[in-house]
Image: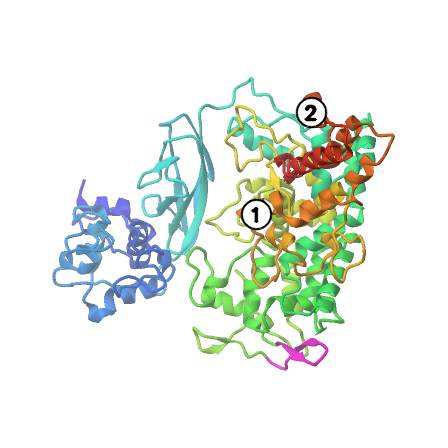
Amino acid sequence: MKPFLHIALLLGCGTLAAQAPKAKLSVPRISFVNDIVPILTKAGCANSNCHGSVRGQAGFKLSLFGYEPELDYAAIVKDADGRRIDRQRPETSLVLTKPTYEIQHGGGERFKNNSLEFAAIRDWIRQGALFDSPNSPRIRDLTVSPAEITLAGESATGKLTAKAAFSNGAVTDVSAKVQYTPSDETIVEIGPAGELKALRTGETTVMVRTLGKAVAARVYVIRRAAGAGYRAPAHNNFIDDHVFAKLKRLNILPSQLSSDTQFLRRVYLDVTGSLPTEEESLEFLSSQEESKRSRLIDRLLESPEYSEVWATRLSDVFRVGGGVGPKAARNMYHHLRTAIATDRPYSELVSQMLTSSGGVSRNAPSNFYRTNFDLKPEDAPITVSQTLLGIRLDCARCHNHPFEKWTQNDFWGFAAFFGRTEFKFTPLDAALILKDRSEIINPGTKKLAIPKYLDGPEVTEGPDEDIRERLAAWITSPKNPWFSRAIVNRVWKHYMGRGLVEPVDDFRVTNPPTNPALLDALADDFAKSNFSLRQLSRRILNSRTYQLSSEFNDSNRGDQINYASYYVKRLMAEQLMDALSQVAGEQEVYRGMKSGARSFEIPAGSPNYFLTTFGRPMFRDVICERDEQPAMAQALHLIAGDTLNKKIVSQKGALARMLDDPYLRDEDVVRRMFFSALVRPPEKTEVELALAPIKEKGKVARRKAFEDLLWALLNSKEFLYNH
C-alpha cells in the first residue's frame, strides 16, 4: 500500500474526503484542525498534565484536548519566532523531534519517527503548515458506540467505535484519532483504535476525547454472563427495573429483602432522623398487613420530623447561616421547613430564591444571595451551577475548564445574569437590591459580559426587566438537562448512601452516572410529579432496592456502586445526637432553642462540640458535602466523652427510671434497652451476657452493670450505623 494511503487511514474528515487517487499519486491536503490537532490530543500532548495545562509546559502551551485549534496553530507556527517548525526540513521540526524523543523531551516518547502520526505532521509542514480555511468542516459532535459494553471472562475482547459529525454534514469514523482514557486501567486495556481487552472483573468508564469534545463509554468485565438460572427478584417500581437490569447484566444477585426490624430502624432514621419508640416498633412488627411498609412510609413522610430533616439537608446545600445573623438564618430555615412540610414544588422554591430581593431578616429567600455569594455577583455562577445544577464552573472563571466543555466566556455570560444584584446595609439588616445596570466585565474580552445560558444562547435584558426571572424559568424547566438530575441525585444519596453521580455536585461527561437510565427515569418522574420532593422520597423508599438487606451474598460482596445491597451509612451528627438523647432519655439542651428541641431544629451553626465532632458544620461558608469519614476524636468522644457518659449516669434518664420500676425484671430492662437502641429484641445469648455481671444484690452493683450495658449498646456499630 502506498504511504499516503496509510496516512489517509489515520486522518479524518478533512483528508479522507479526498477522491480516489489520480494517475499521479500525491499526499492529500491535510487539515490542521481535523487531522493534526487530534494527533496531539491522542498522543497526550494536550492533556492537563502536559502542554494543555493552564500554564503549558516549558514555554509551550496548547489548548486543553484541542479545544481551541486557533490557539494551537499560533503556538506551533507563530510563537517562539516560529522555531517549532522547519519548512525547509520538516522532519527536523521541534514539533516532531521532541515527541519522537530525538531531542530530550520531558514528556518522553509520544510516537515514533516511522509512525503515521509523524508522517502526517511532516507532510502538513511540507504543504505549507497552513491553517484551515474559514469554510472548512469543523467537528460538531462526537459519539462512541456502544455506550455500554460487557466483556465476559478475562482476556475477552471488544471494540469501541468513535464517530465525529462535522459542520458539512459528514459523519466520519475517528476511532484511530481519538484519545481513550479508562478511569481504571487495571480493568481493561485499550488499543489505539478502540480495541478492548479485559484484564480483571469490574467496571470502568472510558473517556473518548478529541478537538475539545468528550464522550464516555461504560465497560463491564464479568466472569460469565447470567444464564437461564439467574433468579430475578421481585420488582416494586421502575427503580428496581433499572437497578436489577444492570445487576443481571453484571451477573450479580441482589441481597435478600431486609427484615422488618432492619427496615423499621432504617426508614425511621432516614425519614425522621430519629429512632422509633418501643410502642411504635411493637405496633409495626406485630402487624400482619402486606402493605404495612408503604403505609408506614406515607405516615413518616407526613411527619414534622421529615420536614426538619430536609430543611437541614437543604440548609447545608444553600449554606444557610453563612454570612448572616441568627435571625436571618432562622427565617431561612423556617422558610425551607415550611416548603418541605407543604410539599411545595422544588422548582417554585428555587425560582423564588433566584428572583428574590429585599432584607434578609424579613424576606427569607434573599438569604440565598447573602449566604452564598459573599456579596460579589461574580460568585453567582459557581454557587448557582453547583448547588442547583450539579455543575462545577469555578475553573472556568479564570480559564477554560480542564475537564469539561465550559469556557471562560460561558462563566462570565452566566455571571451577567446577576450583574445588577447588590447588597445595601443598615445597622439592622442587609437588603438585596437591583442596580440600574450590570457592571460585570469579562476579563477575557475586556467587555461588558452579556447574559448567556449554559450551553445556550445569549439573551438581552429588556427595559424594566429583571433578567433573573428568565434565568429562573430556564433553570427550573423540565427540559433543563441538569436541574432535576442534580436534586434527584442528592436525595438518592441521602437514602441510598451513594449518589448515582459522585461527588453529587460534579456532573460532567468525564464523570458519568453509574446507572444513567435510572438517573434519567428518576429525573423524569420528579418533573412529572410537579417537582415533589415527597413523591421522590416515596418512590425511593418503596423500592425493593432501598429495602434490600445490608448483608452481602457471595455474588455481590464486592459491589460498591450498583446497589446490590443496602449500603451501611454512619449516622449524621444530628441523627446520632438525637438517638443518644432518645435512648438515654436525657434531652440535650441547646441555647436559644425551646426545651425538648431536636438537633435537626437548629437553623445554623453547631452549638456543641459533639455535633461539630461528628460533622455538623460550624460555618456553612464553603460549597461542600459533609465529611463522612470516621475520626479519632469521634471514637474518643463516644468512649469517654461527657456528652454520652452524663446521659448514661443521669438520675433522671431512662435507665434510672427503669431500674426504679419495681414491676420490671432485669430481663425486661435488657429487652427494653435493646428495643430502644437497636429496634430489635435481644437474642438469648445477649440476655445471658448482659445479666452475667449482675451477681451481687447491691443496688450500686446492679446499676453499674446496666450502665456498662447501655454504654456498650451506644458504642456498638449496630447503633452507630444505619443498616
Q: Which residue occupies the foreground of this view, 72 or 419? A: 419
Q: Which quarter of the image is occupied by the C terminus?
A: top right
- Residue at 69 percent of width and 25 percent of height: 692
Q: Quadrant for the N terminus, please.
A: top left
Residue 573 coordinates in the image, percent (x, y): 65, 49
SS at circle 2: loop
**Rendered residue at 50%/31% (across/down):** 558
* Residue 540 coordinates in the image, percent (x, y): 68, 40
- Nearest the eye: 120 or 642: 642
Where does the magenta region start and end? 421-437
Q: Visible in this render: residue 721?
A: yes
Q: How is the image coloured?
A: rainbow
Query: Residue 256: percent from the left, percent from the top?
Result: 64, 25
Q: Nearer the viewer, residue 494 or 327?
A: 327
Q: Amino acid at mark 1?
A: Glu
The numbered mark at residue 454 is none
Please say if the residues under marks 1 and 2 sit with CB atoms less than 8 Å apart. Answer: no
Marking on residue 692: 2
Q: Is residue 158 above or below residue 115?
A: above
Q: Amino acid at mark 2?
A: Ala
What's the distance in space between the residues labelled 1 and 2, CA to CA?
A: 37 Å
Q: Is residue 575 visible?
A: no
Residue under pointer 1? 628
Crowd rating for badge 1 (residues with CA inside 10 Å; few <14, some 14–19, many 20+): few
Point out the residue furthest to the top here.
Answer: 229
Q: Secondary structure at mark 1?
A: loop
Q: Is residue 32 left or right of residue 96?
A: right
